[in-house]
């Protein structure tokens, strides 16, 4: 019997190859990773298991870790994401003036660092429930992206990310 992860790997490889990607190494690496997960009794991809698997066997050149993790990351980010967590922060620049022009990012705005006297940018990050980053956004410092962490639910309008459309809802713990 084929596991759900094995089917996901086959679908992922088929789709990506149909788009023109060769995926020769991934065709070998990803089934090995799924076998590792199944042997460990896990049915989801986590950062911890990906790192543990990538570092096997003992004594392997670290460049091989990178190749293995890149393959797993591409596959894992292609999986359906049902729940994401999203939050924003701001960071400031040690300069006196904001940038000029319509496309400028360094702008004066609400500073979470309590530095309204310096130009800043707003940064947003969406992560899975395991903490794996899915997407990062940057906005001009005068953007209105304030508020606490949010829970993003799949299948509802709102988040500008392919296959991860969601409604921003205040986290009950914010």
Image (tube, helix red, strand yellow):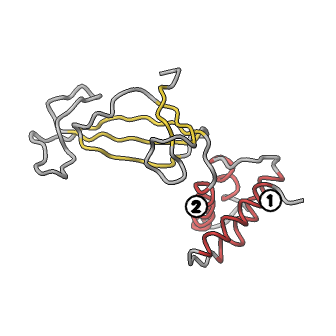
The disc placed on residue 161 is: none
Q: Which residue is mark 2?
A: 74
Q: Which residue is mark 1?
A: 35
Q: Position of residue 133 (x, y in %)?
A: 51, 46
At mark 2, the secondary structure is helix
Q: Position of residue 142 (x, y in %)?
A: 21, 37
Above or below, 164 relative to 64: above
User: Left or right of 135: which side holds 55?
Assistant: right
Q: Is tag 1's residue or tag 2's residue first in the polypeptide sequence?
A: 1
Question: Residue at 56% across / 78% down in the picture?
Answer: 20
The quarter holding residue 22 reads bottom right
Above or below, 156 relative to 40: above
Above or below, 151 relative to 14: above
Q: Find out whether the residues at labels 1 and 2 contact each other: C-beta distance under 8 Å.
A: no
At mark 1, the secondary structure is helix
Question: Residue at 28% across / 38% down in the picture?
Answer: 91
The quarter holding residue 6 reads bottom right
For disc 2, the neighbor class at 10 Å (few under 14, some 14 to 19, many from 20) is few
Q: Position of residue 43 (x, y in %)?
A: 76, 47
For the N terminus, which image quadrant? bottom right
């Amino acid at each position: 019997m084929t596991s759900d992860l094995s089917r996901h790997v086959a679908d992922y490889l088929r789709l990506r190859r149909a788009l023109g990607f060769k995926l020769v190494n991934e065709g070998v690496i990803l089934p090995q990773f799924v076998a590792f997960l199944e042997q460990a009794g896990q049915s989801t991809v986590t950062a911890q298991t990906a790192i543990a698997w990538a570092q096997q066997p003992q004594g392997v050149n670290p460049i091989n870790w990178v190749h293995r993790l890149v393959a797993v990351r591409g596959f894992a980010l292609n999986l359906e994401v049902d729940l994401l967590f999203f939050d924003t922060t701001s960071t400031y620049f040690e300069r006196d003036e904001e940038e000029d022009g319509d496309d400028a990012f360094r702008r004066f705005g609400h500073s979470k660092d309590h530095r309204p006297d310096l130009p800043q940018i707003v940064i947003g990050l969406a992560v899975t429930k395991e903490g794996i980053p899915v997407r990062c956004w940057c906005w001009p410092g005068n953007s209105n992206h304030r508020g606490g962490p949010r829970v993003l639910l799949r299948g509802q309008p709102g988040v500008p990310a392919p296959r991860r459309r969601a409604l921003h809802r205040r986290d009950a713990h914010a």
